[in-house]
Amino acid sequence: ALKFLSNVDLAYHWNWLDREVFLALWIAIFGMLGLYLIGKIRFAHDSPLQHLSVTRTILAVTVFAFVVYMVPGMWGAPLKSISAFLPPS
């Protein structure tokens, strides 16, 4: 959804979603996903986790690694693997 909103933002020259804002939103969303996967964030229908499964742990580590990968992009580092989704600098 952010990618399509970014395309509209570029077409109409609103300048709401520049590269840093886009990355900050992705970092926040994926960071919260990682916290959900390890059981730190729960919704009303979720039961408490007694232990993490191997699959859930691997997925959480992957999500947190992706967040760490995106953080240097906030200061202009090239993020080649996701550059197609990011707005131009």
Image (cartoon, grey):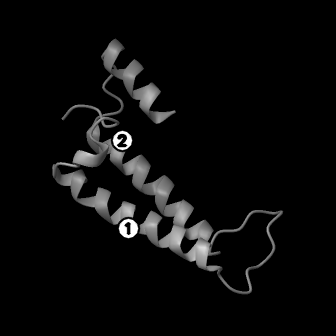
Which numbered marker is on residue 22?
2
Q: Residue at x 79, y 67 (%)?
A: 46
| Residue at disc 1, secondary structure | helix
Q: Position of residue 19 (x, y in %)?
A: 27, 39
31 vs 51, left or right, is left
Q: Position of residue 38 (x, y in %)?
A: 60, 75
> Is residue 72 rendered to the left or right of residue 14?
left
Q: Give coordinates of residue 52: x percent, y percent.
A: 65, 81
62 above or below 12? below
Using the image, determine if residue 39 lies above or below residue 89. below
Q: Nearer the viewer, residue 24 or 37?
A: 37
Dot 1, how many residues are within 10 Å of its Cα: few (below 14), some (14-19), or many (20+)? some
Q: Quadrant of residue 68?
A: bottom left
Asked if the residue at tag 2 contacts the one at tag 1, i.e. Cβ–Cβ closer than 8 Å, the answer is no
Label 2: state its secondary structure: helix
Return the residue at label 1. Answer: 65
Question: What's under tag 1, amino acid-wise?
Answer: Ala
Relative horizontal placement of residue 37, taking residue 61 as reference (left or right)? right
